[in-house]
Image: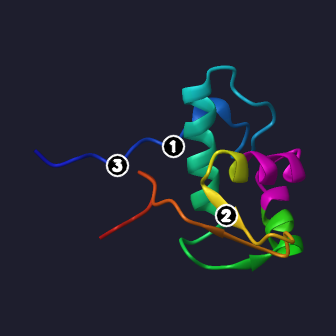
Amino acid sequence: PELLPAPPPDRFLVRGRLETLPRRRADRDLVFRYLATQVLAVHDPVGERELTERLAGVSRDPVGLRRELVDAGIVTRTRDGSEYWRTVVTEFDDLS
C-alpha cells in the first residue's frame, strides 16, 4: 500500500503561523517537523539571522522556535550558533 503524505498540522496554526505551542509533546513535535520543512532544506546551512528571519514568517516567537527545533534534534547548529541546518528528513518532505 502506498503511504499517503501526512496532512499539515493546520489545526495548530493560525493562517499558517504558530501562535501558541500545542500542549501534547507529539503534537509539538509534529508542528516542529512541519515548520522546519517550511524554512530549511535538509543539510542546507543558513546563518542565525537568516534562520530567525525565516522563522519570523511562521512564528510569533522565532528565537524560541529556533531553540525548540535545536532541542528537538531537528535542526543542528555550530557550537558558536553562527550556522544552522536541518538534519532530519520528515514526513512533510517531498521525496519524489
Kindly check if marks 1 and 3 are in contact, taking CB atoms under 8 A apart as contact.
Answer: no
Task: Report the predominant secondary structure element of the magenta stretch.
Answer: helix
Q: Is residue 79 left or right of residue 25?
A: right
The residue positioned 76% from the left and 72% from the top of the image is 78
* Mark 1 residue element: loop
Type of amino acid at the residue the image marks with label 3: Pro
Q: How far apart are marks 1 and 3 (CA)?
A: 9 Å
Question: Who comes first in sequence, dot 1 or dot 2?
Answer: 1
Q: Where is residue 31 in the image (x, y as percent from the top left)?
A: 61, 40
The residue carrying mark 1 is 8
Nearest to viewer (mark 1 / mark 2): 2
Instruction: Identify residue for label 2.
Output: 76
Residue 20 % position (x, y)? 80, 31
Q: Residue 5 carries which label?
A: 3
Residue found 85% across the figure and 57% down from its top: 56
Q: Is residue 87 shown above or below 64? A: below
Magenta range? 55-68
